[in-house]
Image: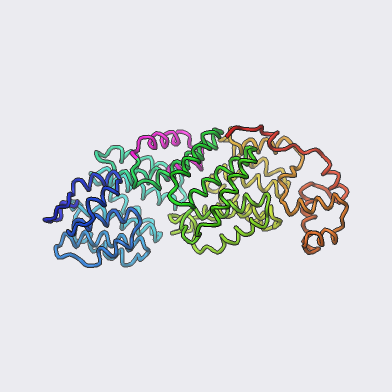
């Protein structure tokens, strides 16, 4: 590609292409930096686009070169950078101008078509994005066909065709593996999304393919973020398979690979959630405290992606023991201006709302905002059911059972978790199915305080004074407790509280980390 632009510089285009295909971006910079040829500037811009340094591209390509080939290449890369910074009109204009000057035999043609399709997808012009991807499929270069399959997978996602998305990603991997010099960055990009889908859906055979490709990829420094994501997602797959030792180890490894403190914190929360769910309460508390300390010193305005969800998970976990801290994290999350998961924020993907609603709902229920919590959990349930994110739907159903004591939610959870019979979620469903006793450790701290004072014989006004709450709040919480324990009076509630409660650690058995 770069050889098409004549230059007298000492820039080694062949070595650059080898490093670029391998995603060895450190080596790419060594070859291109401090070179004054336009060929080297284009090379640096290609690397900058892959590393999401779009402003660097805008600065480097501000002045057009004199030769026609250089102008075309500049229009393609500058148009891509503008489009990826959401200046869609300017980006599309430059790319269309470049395409008019080329034929499919030109070295920059399929790059231009790819970026035109990407901008169309970002602006939700899905037919145009699909047409651009299909045009790339005629290329003789498997790498071009592979990235076309990735774009088709994103179109399938937007149209709600999840299994079609999986199929396109598998085809993309096939294309990259057929290439003499595979584009490892694009291959890793496809693998991340496929691993995410295997984490969410019952795709055991596809999951084995993901593990195999993961082991075979030469993970260079340019693929740090992708390697981190796949490592964490495979650990999540192990968790759902009931292989908790492997999951703990995988989350620990992911933390070491984390590209930021925010991502490392999220890995600590992964371990804390798993530990709490398997009865390792001491270890869970240690991990949660460690995450809490990190969360206090990092700047959340610097986090622009899914790692912001750590605030919601912190609220969810602290709601078990410290309502005040949970409320602080919920409030901090509300101050963030943009949606999590940038690749989804270009559209109106409801899964983002599902992830948010589940964690918020669990936290709200446990800190005493039961009605708001149930509404959020019900919304999350509906979203996950629509996408067949079955284990997440099962978690929602369990949380709704805890909030309402409505045993119909247990049946729904059992149906959803059936593909993962060895997971801790399945064990939790079985436990809930086999007992009619309400678990005190599932009662939010705010309500447990009311319970303790009811058992002590205190009246509502006395409870309100002791806890610093309004009498109306105490009456509402007491009414919710009546519903939870399926009783109609304070006397029946005290009698229900006298029933023995089996600790979670004894029900599930202690497990080594």
Residue 485: percent from the left, percent from the top?
79, 46
The quadrant holding residue 220 is top left
Magenta region's main secondary structure? helix
- Please determine whether, in this image, residue 392 is positioned above or below residue 478: above
Residue 200: percent from the left, percent from the top?
51, 43
Residue numbers of the magenta segment: 193-218
Residue 509: percent from the left, percent from the top?
66, 32
The residue depicted at 34 percent of the width and 47 percent of the height is: 222
Asked whether residue 154 is in view, the answer is: yes
Classify the position of the C terminus by image quarter. Answer: top right
Q: Give the image's coloring scheme.
A: rainbow
Observer-nearest residue: 164 or 378? 378
Asked whether residue 365 is in view, the answer is: no
Q: Is residue 226 left or right of residue 181?
A: right
The quadrant holding residue 479 is bottom right
- Please determine whether, in this image, residue 42 is positioned above or below residue 267: below
Q: Check if residue 229 falls in the magenta segment.
A: no
The residue depicted at 27 percent of the width and 57 percent of the height is: 45
């Amino acid at each position: 590609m770069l050889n098409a632009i004549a230059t007298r510089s000492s820039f080694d285009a062949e070595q650059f292409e080898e490093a670029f295909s391998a995603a060895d971006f450190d080596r790419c910079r060594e070859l291109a930096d401090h070179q004054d040829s336009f060929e080297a500037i284009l090379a640096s811009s290609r690397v900058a686009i892959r590393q999401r340094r779009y402003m660097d591209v805008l600065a480097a390509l501000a002045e057009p070169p004199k030769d026609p080939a250089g102008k075309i290449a500049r229009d393609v890369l500058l148009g891509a950078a503008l489009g990826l910074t959401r200046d869609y009109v300017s980006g599309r204009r430059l790319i269309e101008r470049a395409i008019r000057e080329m034929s499919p035999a030109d070295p920059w043609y399929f790059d231009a078509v790819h970026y035109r399709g990407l901008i169309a997808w970002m602006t939700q012009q899905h037919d145009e994005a699909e047409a651009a991807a299909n045009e790339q499929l005629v290329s003789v270069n498997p790498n071009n066909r592979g990235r076309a399959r990735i774009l088709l997978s994103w179109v399938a996602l937007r149209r709600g065709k999840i299994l079609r998305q999986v199929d396109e990603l598998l085809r993309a991997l096939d294309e990259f593996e057929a290439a003499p010099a595979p584009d490892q960055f694009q291959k890793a990009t496809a693998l991340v999304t496929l691993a995410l889908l295997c984490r969410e859906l019952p795709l055991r055979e596809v999951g084995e393919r993901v593990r195999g490709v993961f082991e075979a990829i030469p993970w260079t420094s340019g693929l740090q973020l992708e390697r981190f994501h796949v490592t964490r997602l495979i650990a999540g797959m192990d968790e759902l398979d009931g292989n908790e030792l492997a999951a703990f180890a995988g989350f620990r490894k992911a933390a070491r690979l984390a590209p930021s403190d925010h991502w490392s914190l999220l890995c600590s929360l992964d371990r804390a959630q798993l530990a709490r769910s398997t009865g390792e309460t001491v270890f869970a508390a240690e991990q949660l405290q460690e995450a809490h300390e990190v969360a206090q010193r990092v700047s959340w305005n610097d986090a622009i992606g899914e790692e912001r969800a750590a605030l919601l998970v912190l609220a969810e976990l602290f709601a078990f023991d410290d309502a005040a801290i949970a409320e602080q994290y919920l409030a901090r999350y509300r101050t963030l201006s943009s949606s999590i998961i940038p690749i989804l924020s270009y559209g109106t993907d409801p899964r983002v709302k599902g992830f948010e609603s589940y964690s918020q709902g669990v936290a709200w229920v446990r800190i005493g905002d039961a009605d708001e919590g149930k509404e959020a959990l019900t919304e999350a349930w509906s979203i996950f059911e629509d996408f067949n994110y079955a284990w997440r739907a099962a978690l929602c159903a369990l949380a709704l059972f805890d909030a309402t004591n409505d045993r119909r939610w247990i049946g729904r959870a059992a149906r959803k978790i059936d593909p993962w019979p060895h997971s801790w979620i399945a064990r939790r469903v079985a436990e809930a199915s086999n007992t009619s006793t309400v678990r005190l450790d599932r009662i939010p701290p705010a309500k447990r305080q009311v319970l303790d004072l009811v058992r002590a014989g205190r009246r509502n006004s006395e409870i309100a004074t002791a806890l610093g709450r309004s009498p109306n709040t105490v009456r509402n919480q007491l009414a919710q407790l009546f519903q939870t324990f399926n009783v109609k009076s304070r006397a029946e509630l005290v009698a229900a509280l006298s029933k023995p409660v089996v600790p979670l650690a004894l029900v599930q058995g202690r497990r080594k980390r």
